Amino acid sequence: MIARRAVLAGAAALAAVLAAPALAHQQKRAISTVAINPRSGAIEIMHQVPVHDAEHALRVQGAQSPDIIGSAESREAFARYVAQRFVLAVDGVVAVPAYVGSEITGGSLWVYQELPAARAGTPIRINSQILTDVWALQENRVNIGSGAGVTTLIFTAGDAAQDMLLAS
Amino acid sequence: MQQTKGSFEDKFRQLDEVLPDPSTTRNASGAPGHEYWQQKVDYKITATLDETKRRLTAKATIRYTNNSPDALPWLWLQLDQNIFKRDSMAELTDAFGGPGRRGPKVSLGSASEPTKLSMDELRRQQAMADNEYGYDISAVTLMDGAALPHTIVGTLMRVDLPAPLAPGETTEFAIEWAFNIVEEDAINARSGYEHFPDDPRKGGNDIFLLAQWFPRMVVYSDYEGWHNKEFLGRGEFTLEFGDYEVDLTVPSDHIIAATGTIQNPDAVLTAAQRQRLETAKDAAAPMFIVTPQEAAAAEAGNPKGTKTWKFAATNVRDFAWASSRKFMWDAQGVKQPGAENETVLAMSFWPKEGGDLWKKYSTAAVVHTLKVYSRFSFDYPYPTAQSVNGPVGGMEYPMITFNGPRTTLNKDGTRTYSLAEKMFLVGVVIHEIGHIYFPMTVNSDERQWTWMDEGLNSFLDSVAGFEWDPNMPWTRSVPRDLVSYMVSNQQEPIMTQSDSVTNLGSNAYGKPSAAYHLLRDTIIGRERFDFALKEYARRWKFKRPTPADFFRTMEEASGTDLDWFWRGWFYSTDHVDISLDSIYRLKVDTKDPDIDLPRRRAEKEAEPDLVGIGLNKAQGLPIWVLENPGVRDFYDTNDQFTVTPKDRKGYTSFLEGLDPWERQVFDRAVKEDANYYVLNFSNKGGLVMPVILGLTFKDGSTQKMNIPAEIWRRNARDVAKLLVFPKGKELVQVVVDPDWETGDADLENNHYPRRIIPSRIEAFKDEASMDRVSRDLMGEAAGAEPDKRK
């Protein structure tokens, strides 16, 4: 048996609402895509988070009246949070993606980041912990590549980073 | 069935070998069979809520009618509250930090990070340690008081009958029970209490949401016998219809919302409240039954003993209720001329924390839902439709729903809400009230097939959302929204048992909703889809459909073989990606050398010169034949396309050799001189789909063409299609799925000629460059012209 130290997590989590996961409320999932743009060669990173989840996460983090749809400030605050919770290392070096922007489409908040060019096949290491500090049920999916050749990594709270090869 | 030679893949294989055989209870067209049966269970319940101890004590008489052709030696009941016992299967199999966990945040440690327990998890652990949850079953007896042997198996209980219950027979027995009500926020459940410590009343107040609160009969069906699958928390419920008489004793100042209608309003409502309720039936807008002032007074006061509210409900599959002194209550009558319930009371109950958000939108959303959903199914089948605010995010029961969105309390004491919160309230009320149609009336098996009610309901709630306000950013679940899920290699087919699905939101809500949008707007068409869906709802109203009944009804009523569609969307994890690989243009050869050869000459001349000859010319190199004119001959003045008498004779012979019908066809084709194009498609995603084409012609005109999915029936990987357009209609561009109807994952290969499709980020950057924020709107408004030199 390996003894493991148990500690209290620092942040108090929002009381999870675990009724029927009607899509009109918290879905507790984020889907990210990491792919090379074949034209520019840049690594494009897109995060899709349900608007409701994003707004409640901001409230958990202390925002008094978050308004993801109506307030650019709320949106940008969440985008900064997403950037902190998504860790990507390219070829062994922790990357600092440039923040491109965010928008709302189809009930989702999209957050965009990008990195300078890298070749397909470059080793990458990823950990998506978006909102895992808020809800135990949070399950994040990261699609590597685009089109028909997508490989998906799944992350839940406390998962270690996973290794993959970059794809376009 | 397996293809053992070659690589043919039959995407159109009929589902007969997969679906259960039709029977006398469920026929081959998807309708209830001529011997369809279902059990009936009637309940008479009396329950008392001990507010201080947060404990419910109750007894029930259950009248069970065996309509099956089988003798039943025992009956099974569902003891859902037992999921909260410390040794329940749900608790014991709750993986720490694992995916799909129903509970507060924990995280498994790693070499560099300690294992973490959140405050919420500790709170949950402490609540579980401090309280005995789950049912205390104190008696199970026959009506004469004789004890009935019973065996509890987790969340199930078997009651052994003195003698098998014969077909057509009815039995009655009684159960007495009690349980401690869980704190919803601490335990995480589908019901429970919420405490408000800051209320003016000493000790604060509670809202109680009571669901899964009585032993409910397990379903005994024609296709599965007893449905005794343990309640693990995610897979919801499978229930029988019956009539309920329920007496609820609560503190005298509580207001109760419940399944059914109040039988003793004189005893529980004031004269003013009764009058308001009567007036509300004809009101054009929601009006208060319990006013904010009355609720505020109750919230600050104390009860004077208890009151017993009596409710009755007919032909419902469940009973739920809510109780609190915090509730405001409004109502508005919805008229359904000619329906069984000509006036339905749409009602909402909420505490001050719901604020104006609830006052403006909850009951309004209930009214809107009834109008839209009834159009797609049947008249709302019950006398009330209620939305109650409490600690549960969103749950549905017959005639009553629990919905979570609230206002935010500001430092200055005001309450406000964001546009998103408004959208969530309207959205969740539509969704949960919609569930009263599916599955509360069209009674599908939620435990086994979440998608049957959630998929259909997500589809209909998006339809209702668009009809509420198309400009709201709803979670709409149309095909283009599901692409990132459907391309993933980590997913399960929709036809997977609910407790085993890893991403239930996308799998059971979003993907089937997208499939129905696609069927309705693209594949079948609105008229036939709506007819078929309404027929499914009509056939299975107050009955229990299975997936096969749904699939068969939709095909039979729409007149469309959709086996390929169910097979691809519901039984596989393929996605949509159709590529237009190439286009070949063909011209009819007239065989007339005086027409064809000059044309071929023109085509030849249109080809670019050889690069080397051009370079020679540029270099000024001499041409031998030009420098030696004396040796020129016939071939220097006639090329390979010169028409000869032999050519003309051959043409005449060709015409003479044709049969009369061939000559007729040939002459017409030559005369029409149409444009022929062969388009080559490949299916890269696996899902066979209609090939929707956006065509643009040289003359600037456009045309949309829908080639049915059956084009893929003999080769699901590559197909070619001949398109013919009249003379003068020359194609210059073709786009597959130009309106993004199918959820095609790769748009770049949809275009011919190929077009660069900007990535999502590139498109965002382009739009951002047009952002009005960066423009000098003040200057523009004043009519100022920018100085372009600066």
Image (cartoon, rainbow, N blue to C red):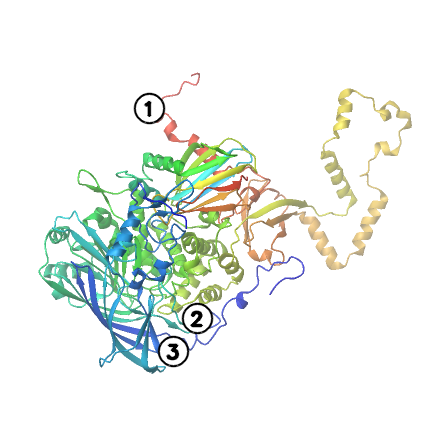
Q: Which of disc 2 and disc 1 is earlier in sequence?
A: 2
Q: Position of residue B191 (x, y in %)?
A: 27, 58
- Callout 3 crowding tier (Cα within 10 Å): few <14, some 14–19, many ≥20: many
Q: Is residue B777 above or below residue B214?
A: above
Q: Confirm whether residue B364 shows in the render.
A: no
Helix or strand or loop: what does disc 3 sit on?
Answer: loop
The CA span between labels 3 and 2 is 18 Å
Q: Amino acid at mark 2?
A: Ala
How far across and how far down the image is residue B221, in percent?
39, 72
**Residue B75 image point, x, y percent:** 34, 75
Q: Amino acid at mark 3?
A: Ser
Q: Which mark is residue B68?
A: 3
Viewer-nearest of discs 1 and 2: 2
Measuring from the top left, give residue B167's x and y in whole percent: 36, 81
> In which image quadrant can residue B49 be found?
bottom left
Name of the residue lying farthest toward the left? B304
Do dots 3 and 2 share one subunit?
yes
Earlier-in-chain disc, 3 versus 2: 2
Residue that numbered label 2 is attached to = B31
